[in-house]
Amino acid sequence: MTEWYQARILRLCELNNVEDKKDILTDIKIKFTALNNRDAEQVARSLNYGPLYSQLTSNDREVVEQVCDILTILFNVLEPGEIYQKYLDEISDLITNPNASVRLLVLREFLRTALHPQKIFQLLADTTLLVSIVNRIGDNDLNVAECAMSIVKKVGENSNGLHVLYKGELLRTFARLLQNDTISFRVYEVIVDIAKTSQEALEVSAQSGFLNSLINILENEDILLQLNALEILTQLAVFEEGLSYLEQQEVLSKLVQKIAQVNENPLSNLLIPGLMKFFGNVARHWPNELFSRYPVVISALFEVIDGGDQNILGPALDTLGFVSASVEGKYALQALGDAMMGALKKIAEIVQRMPTALRIRGLNNLALILEVKRPHQDNRILSLTKLWFDSLCDDPLGMIVGICRQPFADIRQAGLEVLAVISLQVWGQEYISIYPGLVEFLLDRNIESFKECKDVKYEVVRCLSQAERDIFDADTMQKFKQFVNEGPYFVEVNTEVAVEGAL
């Protein structure tokens, strides 16, 4: 069986005509993909791949793409690491092939090896190969660069690999890549992703000096570089050891200072979205720490929302949503007094009057502000979310229902998601039960044409079908349960029976 494939591959190497080559490659692919798993594995393991590799230097891009396609199929039939063992020199050379598809082919095979707990040690033992892979983080083709980054991250997650990466030639390779501003952030992303996997990884990454280099960018005059650094440091701040490390390096206090001085430098305004996102993510995980240690951040957040500057309003809304996502965060905001009430009134204005993208963002974050999962519900938290909902405007439910009736899928869905959040809470169920025409609207399948909206409306009705006793009458509860049993996409068919002679 293998002989046919080997003969066709050798014939491929003898031909000069590009179209003839493409025909042979097509035949090989069709015949191979028709094999059962056992035969495919036998052929893939028995073939001599050398002649196929030689075709990867062809001047015809389509031929190279087809060969890559066939090699990808063959590689995937084999165990990770098999190709590495048989053709180490050949595929190591292909990492620097001029064609991005070839580089990607080889790197994807190494990624399979890196993802295999037993086979990853092949990579760890080959420093020369790892240097080649790390260099590809600087590749001009983003897909190639991202694949190389994934491999290096997996190596760094391994305790042995961690120590291999941060010494000798590999350490120097990282350092060389950091000389280029664009590529450097790819390297920093890898370093931070490794650092956040364990306490040991954080310590080794810090000892390399690279985390300090990233932190120092926050002092750079280039706002764009600062924003990029903030984006990556945000990932470090969301796990406890990472946040502690950043506090030890006084990163958070420096960022707070930047917020406090924002009015002194007009360009600093450009930093606010990144700063908001950073502290928003911190607040999502550690709300109490943020409120107790960095109150100026919360004050700045409310100022931005109150100011209504559309350029920085989106990230501020997201940050408030992050802060409010946990019950802890909700209570911390409540303790601030009237500030939250003012922000809620502003959100009501945003979701009614501002451009669509901001309206949707406002609604998405309003859903986070009001959401309380059933296990966390008690009288105290439900009283708070009811108070906040009532504070939005004179007729908050009317406002949300109006948005749910919009003819555009995106904003309609965002409105329904707010409705879903309140339908899980007793006070929300009570409001829905007495709002004129709302139950009928929720049960009417004919007015919902968007799949996303059908899904959310189904969720609303599902919550209402489990409502507290005596909020809805028995007939309505029966309709809710029937709606849920029929599923989100049920279509009612009207059957007309023709009666002979009726005409």
Image (cartoon, rainbow, N blue to C red):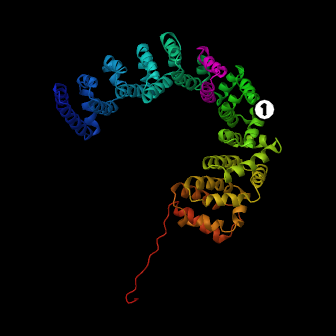
Position of 308 relative to 483 (above/below): above
Q: Residue furthest front?
A: 266
Image coordinates for residue 264, horizontal then vertical, percent: 75, 27
Which type of secondary structure does the marked residue at label 1 adopt?
helix
- Given residues 396 and 59, the one toward you in this image is 59
Magenta residues, as a range? 206-235
Q: Can residue 322 be found in the magenta stretch? A: no
In this image, 497 relative to 353: left or right? left
Image coordinates for residue 282, horizontal then vertical, percent: 68, 33
Q: Can residue 230 be found in the magenta stretch? A: yes
Q: Is residue 260 visible from the viewing direction of this image? A: yes
Q: Residue furthest top?
A: 168
Q: Main secondary structure of the magenta part?
A: helix
Position of 380 relative to 404 (above/below): above
In this image, 131 relative to 329: left or right? left
Q: Quadrant of the N terminus?
A: top left
The residue drawn where x is 70% and y is 23% is 251
Position of 10 relative to 400 (above/below): above
Q: Quadrant of the C terminus?
A: bottom left
Q: Residue furthest right?
A: 337
Which residue does the numbered mark 1 point to in the structure image?
Answer: 296
In this image, 259 relative to 111: left or right? right
Name the kind of residue labelled 1 in the image.
Val
Image coordinates for residue 6, horizontal then vertical, percent: 19, 28
Q: Is residue 121 visible from the viewing direction of this image? A: no
